[in-house]
Image (spheres, rainbow, N blue to C red):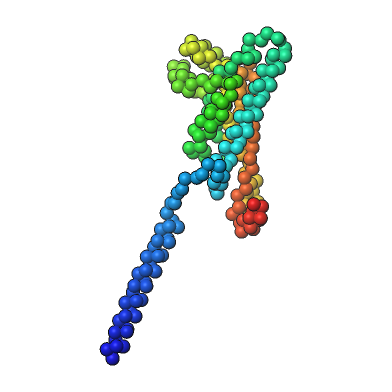
Amino acid sequence: MSNKKSNLQCMKFFRLVSGCVLLSLCVLFVSGCFGTKARVMHRGEENMVGSNKAGSEVYNPIVHKTVDKLLSKVALSNVKQVGYSEINPIANQQLCVYFAGVENKSMEELGDFREHLKVSINEKITQSDQIVIVSDRAVNAVLRSLTLRPDDLFAEHNTQNFISAMGKHGTPVDYLLYAEITSGTTESNRDMQREYKLTLRLIDTHTWREIVESSQIRKEYNNSAKGKIANWFKK
């Protein structure tokens, strides 16, 4: 009788220990699923693809492609100027450009990518010896003194006052550079395709002529089971 009672107690104790272990494992599993786990990505590793909106996998390629196309067109424009006259003091000079920033006209909020895009475009452009980006601090100081915003520079008298003020500070401005992010969405039931476009507009402050270049990337978002299965076979 005593052996049977002892066996029952052992079984109860074993069940209690097993239950505690199982409960601990469940807690660890659930906390691992809902917690954040991070790692440092290796150089050359592909960017993570955002599940809900565009990220570096979209913006980085179109920045590089669009800036390259813009610089090529600027170089071609300078070559044409040299063709008109063998002695052209403007052709081989660097262009002083004020980069007014990134305007978001897409369906998505840019968040911290707005400044990131501006810095990326700035860095890419300054790798060329054709364009010099005027300091934001110098421009902002002049704009404040004139009580103007970047968008106000499209008015002729505002532009002339701005150029004159920048010249007095020893920082001439030949061109204004604007970047625009736009998007176009195609929906198919619960799935959709979104096209992202980056447009760079380089505007001559004297003639208002524009040099415009753009690049785009399409991205597919799948919410339906059918779309997810079809997308798996596209990889």
Would residue 88 appear left or right of 103 to someone viewing this image? right
Q: Position of residue 215 (x, y in %)?
A: 64, 34
The residue positioned 52% from the left and 23% from the top of the image is: 150
Q: Quadrant of residue 175?
A: top right
Residue 36 % position (x, y): 43, 51
In this rendering, the count of numbered labels is: 0
Q: Nearer the viewer, residue 199 or 184?
A: 199
Q: Residue furthest left?
A: 2
Q: Residue at x 42, y 60 (%)?
A: 30
**Foreground: 130 or 33?**
130
Extreme residue in the bottom direction: 1
Image position of 194 with respect to 62: above or below? below
* Image quadrant where one finds the N terminus: bottom left
Answer with the quarter of the image where residue 227 lies: bottom right
Looking at the image, which residue is at 56% across and 18% down? 96
> Can residue 58 be seen here?
yes
Give the left or right position of residue 189, taking residue 165 as reference: right
Which residue appears farthest toward the top when viewing the image?
Answer: 87
Q: Nearer the viewer, residue 106 or 78?
A: 78
- In the figure, 82 relative to 31: above or below? above
**Relative height, residue 56 to residue 12 (above, below):** above
* Image coordinates for residue 160, horizontal then vertical, percent: 55, 13
Q: Horizontal and vertical percent for residue 223?
A: 59, 54
Horizontal side of 21 relative to 113 (left or right) equals left
The residue located at (60%, 20%) in the rendering is 130
Report whether residue 182 is seen: no
Q: Quadrant of residue 178?
A: top right
Q: Nearer the viewer, residue 185 or 227?
A: 227
